[in-house]
Amino acid sequence: MTMPMPRDYQLACSEFERLLAVAQDAAGLATRNQTWTMVQAVFQVFRKRLSLEDAIRFSQVLPALARALFVADWEPEADIQAFADRETMTREVQALRRHHNFAPDSCIADVAAAVRACVDVAAFERMLATLPAEAGAFWAVSG
């Protein structure tokens, strides 16, 4: 008997496109490329504040391609940075590919809304509860 391919992988492209569409709409961005940069930057800014174990646990609740983006180009041996205030972390998001980055000041909340629209929210909240308290504040929709 063969095991069917998990739904998360069967629908990976359409689920990722949905995440990008929700983020694009929330941020009021004009293109998918602008949205990609914003989502990638938000993931990187968050990821560098987690231990390897916490980051892997976080990634497990993301859809497949979002999970891949979350871990792409990661240097797990890099020092873990402390969480900062929302404005400081927003500036970090906006610094990725600075001349091609159109992330608005609401970018973290916009990506948080998109992620929450595309995950099992109960599982997401349970996972956030296992992370440092600042992680929950990072993924708050209003910030």
Image: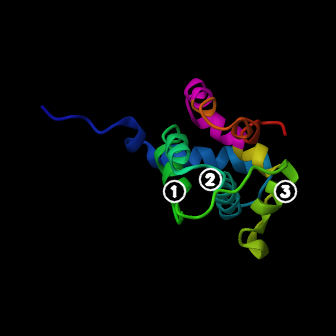
Amino acid bearing label 3: Thr
Residue 101 vs residue 86, the one in the foreground: 86
* First reached walking from the N terminus: tag 1 or tag 2: 2
Quadrant in the rendering for residue 140: top right
Asked if residue 102 shows in the view, the reply is no
Q: Mark 1 points at which residue?
A: 71
Is 57 left, or right, of 139 in this rendering? left
Residue drawn at x 16%, y 35% is 2
Quarter of the figure that contains the C terminus: top right
Q: Name the residue under label 2.
A: 47
Residue drawn at x 42%, y 39% is 8
Quarter of the figure that contains the N terminus: top left
Secondary structure under the numbered disc 2 in the rendered image? helix
Secondary structure under the numbered disc 3 in the rendered image? helix
* First reached walking from the N terminus: tag 2 or tag 3: 2
Amino acid bearing label 2: Arg
Secondary structure under the numbered disc 1 in the rendered image? helix
Q: Name the residue under label 3.
A: 88
Distance in Å between CA atoms under marks 1 and 3 = 22 Å
Range of the magenta residues? Answer: 112-126
**Dot 1 and dot 2 residues touching (CB under 8 Å):** yes
Distance in Å between CA atoms under marks 1 and 2 = 8 Å
Q: Would you say the magenta stretch is mainly helix, strand or loop?
A: helix
Mark 2 neighbour density, 10 Å: few (under 14) some (14–19) many (20 or more): many
Looking at the picture, does residue 87 appear above or below residue 140? Answer: below
